Image: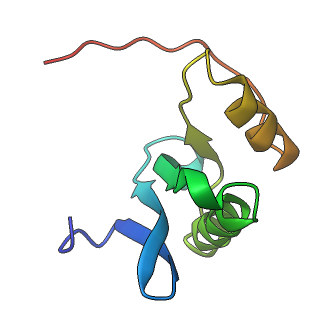
Amino acid sequence: MENDPDRTVLVAERRGQIIGTLDLLVVANLTHDAQPWAVVDNLVVDPETRLQGIGRALMEDALERAAQAGCYKIELLSHESRQGAHRFYAALGFENSAEGFRRYL
């Protein structure tokens, strides 16, 4: 991961302890005038530090980095049972826009 120029792992720390992470991947694209798009994966905030703006700060950093990379959109997946997370993403301007499919290999 550390040698992938299209991947950025964002880390939030407090007093030398990791309290949040976010994995941002910029994906090359054949459509939309070859503009890339971005994927947010594994936004994780320590349960003891939630509701303190850490997740928001990580997401805002990811949004800025995606915009700087010329991405035309940013996507993420969240399980349907995670309604609190869905409200959080909606507050950041994300829309529930698609139904996904998955196959494990």
At which x and y percent is residue 14?
A: 54, 82
Residue 27 to residue 12: above or below: above
The residue positioned 61% from the left and 15% from the top of the image is 80
The image quadrant where one finds the C terminus is: top left
Residue 88 visible from this viewpoint: yes
Query: 11 or 40, which is in the foreground?
Result: 11
Residue 37 visible from this viewpoint: no
Residue 65 to residue 45: above or below: below
At which x and y percent is residue 95?
A: 78, 31
Q: Image check: 7 left or right of 72?
A: left
Q: Image check: 76 left or right of 52?
A: left
At which x and y percent is residue 39?
A: 49, 47
The image quadrant where one finds the N terminus is: bottom left
Outermost residue toward the left in this view: 105
Question: Could you tell me how many numbered marks the image carries?
Answer: 0
Quarter-wise, where is residue 81 in the image?
top right
Task: Give the color scheme: rainbow, by chain, secondary structure or one colour.
Answer: rainbow
